[in-house]
Image (spheres, rainbow, N blue to C red):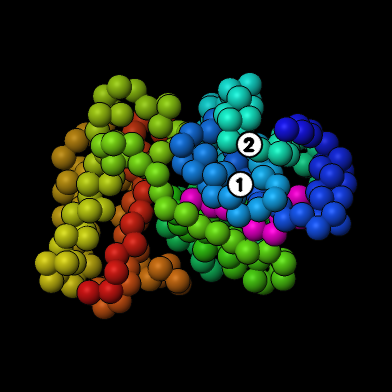
Amino acid sequence: MEIVHDPSAVQHLCEAIRKGGRTIGLVPTMGFLHEGHLSLMRRARAENDVLAVSIFVNPTQFGQGEDFDSYPRDLAGDLVRLEGVGADVVFAPRAESIYPKRYRTFVEVAEITEWLCGASRPGHFRGVATVVAKLFNLMKPHRAYFGQKDYQQTVVVRRLVADLNFDLTIVVLPTVREPDGLAMSSRNARLTPDQRRVAPVLYRSLRRSEEQIKGGERNATIILEGMREMIEADPLAQIDYLALCDPDTLKAVDRIEGPTLAAVAVRFGHTRLIDNILIAAP
Ligand code: PAF
């Protein structure tokens, strides 16, 4: 396993791999790896000659007052996990090498970044799109792997790839969950025991929306109200947003008439968790 910190070194390495005719599967991460990341890596390992992973807590996707400083980090533990999953290339740059002093260029994906997480985290997707574009340019993947838990991020990255003509395939894999349904996330480590006990309510509320739709309910307001009631039953959970939307445009729907994305963001103290499910057309 080759661990590289320098952007130009990883670019040369990945260019050489490509020239040698081998395919590269990239899993971009912010580290503190869990089973959700590892499932992406196993798939990338199986589908490509070379498994490349980036570990970078990207400062530009965190707003003021967000958890950049307290975001969990464990590079030593991550490297052990990466050995276990058979990673070939690990890119772990320092922030100053990705954003040097005179750095001025950012990638904006319009419209689909304005609501859901984009509304509560202004500038977040600009930071994501920028760093993902840089990682694609540096690591030259044939395929890049993302988890469905960050559904809006996957829509933004697909748009970015299409609009900027990146020559690679985006692969999105299902959310990996704890036995009680909580979506795996590095941020789960920051929950207190009481918050952790309540946190599976995100998934339960999503499942409830699905049951209501399967039971014939078509009115989005009624379904969202049911989800709200369930989440607000515990004062530790503060709703950031609840949404029923079109899975392609991410626009909110008033009536359930086709495939629907149910999405939630909930704060537990300073920790904000997100989750979503795709519900088939009724
Ligand atoms: O999903 C994440 O961990 C991050 O948003 C990503 C894609 C690695 C970009 O920093």
One can see residue 238 in this view: no
Element type at marker 2?
loop
On the rendered structure, is 213 left or right of 109? left
Q: What residue type is labelled 2?
A: Gly
Residue at 64 percent of width and 71 percent of height: 162
Where on the picture, by quarter, is residue 6?
top right
Which residue is drawn at the image coordinates 72% and 71% (left, top)? 165
* 55 magenta-colored: no
Q: Position of residue 193 (x, y in %)?
A: 30, 22
Magenta span: 137-147
Please indicate whether residue 236 sits to the left or right of residue 105 in the image. left
Q: Mark 1 points at which residue?
A: 45
* Label 1 Cα neighbours within 10 Å, binned few <14 / some 14-19 / many ≥20: many
Q: Residue at x 67, y 45 (%)?
A: 51
Query: Which quarter shows the C terminus?
Result: bottom left
Q: What element carries label 1?
A: helix
Judging by the rendered image, the residue that carries numbered circle 2 is 86
